[in-house]
Image: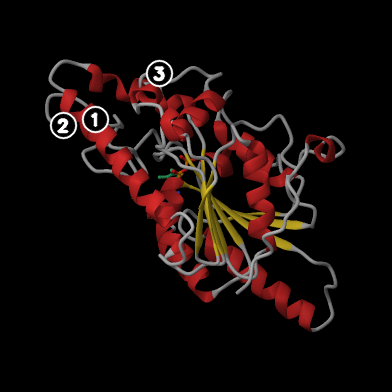
Amino acid sequence: MSTTTKEKPVTLKTLTNKQDLLSGGHRMCAGCGAPTVVRQVLLAIDEPVVISNATGCLEVSTCLFPYTAWRVPWMHSAFENAAATASGIETMYRALRKKGKIKKNMKFIAFGGDGGTYDIGFQALSGAMERGHQLLYICYDNGAYMNTGIQRSSATPFGANTTTCPAGSKIPGKLQKRKDLTRIMAAHNVAYAAQASPHNWRDLMTKVKKALASDGPAYMGIVAPCNRGWRTQTDDSILLSRLAVETCYWPLYEVENGTWTINYDPKDKKKPITEWIKPQGRFKHLFAPGNEWMLEKFQQIVDEDWESLKKLQGTFGR
Ligand SMILES: Cc1ncc(C[n+]2csc(CCOP(=O)(O)OP(=O)(O)O)c2C)c(N)n1
């Protein structure tokens, strides 16, 4: 499988004439990172696109019958099968193109939250990637099942307080580290896998273009702060996305046909993880006396993951 690596970088000038394909007036919370992510993704696309959306905040809050915020064809999917729905649509498209009934070059995207991607939709996602469908799966990762009241997912960071791993006298928040889904996707031998963040819109949009130009399935994990679940200010979403990257909790990297590239290396300016977690109420207990070991452990997890990612930089393989 080959990927078009020569996608032109997106410029603000090219974006000024484009229409937002996710309209205002949707019911996502003020300051939520997810609609910003979706807007950036849709602005990056020039071809007609069809969306499959897993149940979650994005799905239920952008399409309240009889209204929709989507200005593109969009299909509600169950929690577990957004990737399977997108696979079916893409297969139908290929069949109709073969018969000459569709002439247009079209793109297919599935959106899911981390609960619908890392956990409940994982089987459908893994299957779609392995079958080699020409689609892009995007997980907007807010690190918990936010829509149903902040339950832990396998994307929830170590130490976070959620309603199903509540920090208290029994446990000090989540005791497991986050599952590294982007690496798991790379291990599926997909044409393109990447991590992005909405604070770096140019990097995010360039990655969407690359992913959609790939000859084969593509996956993107995009960090999407949630002020309700993270217990943060409503205007901190972009700042927290930036800090996630600058602390190396959420490194920006891409795997193109098996070759790993880190897109942002802070080098000696790598910030301590406390800079990302301090503004977040879900980590408040980590700063209480007796929980110092958790801060140390969190830093150790981030450092180890970062060092292991750096070893993959420039290499081919998984
Ligand atoms: C099979 C199934 N289990 C549970 C639910 C209830 N449910 C709807 S949305 C949701 C949470 C979604 O979490 P996530 O995918 O992380 O997206 P977010 O809401 O955080 O955007 C849950 C548990 C469901 N709709 N279907």
Q: Which numbered circle lies on residue 279?
A: 3
Residue at the location (40% across, 22% down)?
231
Asked whether 50 or 251 is in front, the reply is 251
Q: Nearer the viewer, residue 201 or 94?
A: 201
Mark 3–mark 1 distance (CA, rounded to whole Å): 18 Å
Residue underneath mark 1: 166
Using the rendered view, name the quadrant where residue 19 is placed. Answer: top right
Quarter placement of the N terminus:
bottom right
- On the image, the x and y values in percent for residue 109 come to 63, 57
Q: Please name the residue shown 70% across and 29% down the image.
A: 25
Amino acid type, callout 3: Pro
Residue extending furthest toward the bottom: 99
| SS for callout 3 | loop
Reading the image, the residue beneath label 2 is 171
In x, y percent, where is residue 306?
Answer: 37, 44
Whether residue 105 can be seen here: yes
Which amino acid is tagged 1?
A: Pro
Query: Distance of mark 2 from mark 1, alpha carbons?
Result: 7 Å
Do the residues bearing badges 2 and 3 touch, measured as CB atoms within 8 Å?
no
39 sits to left or right of 96: left
Say which amino acid is labelled 2: Ile
**Element type at marker 1?**
loop
SS at mark 2 in the image? loop
Closer-to-camera residue (22/211)? 211
Q: Nearer the viewer, mark 2 or mark 3?
A: 3
- Residues tagged 2 and 1 counted as in contact (Cβ below 8 A): yes
Provide residue 240's location: percent of width, then percent of height. Answer: 48, 26
Q: Residue at x 65, y 70 (%)?
A: 215
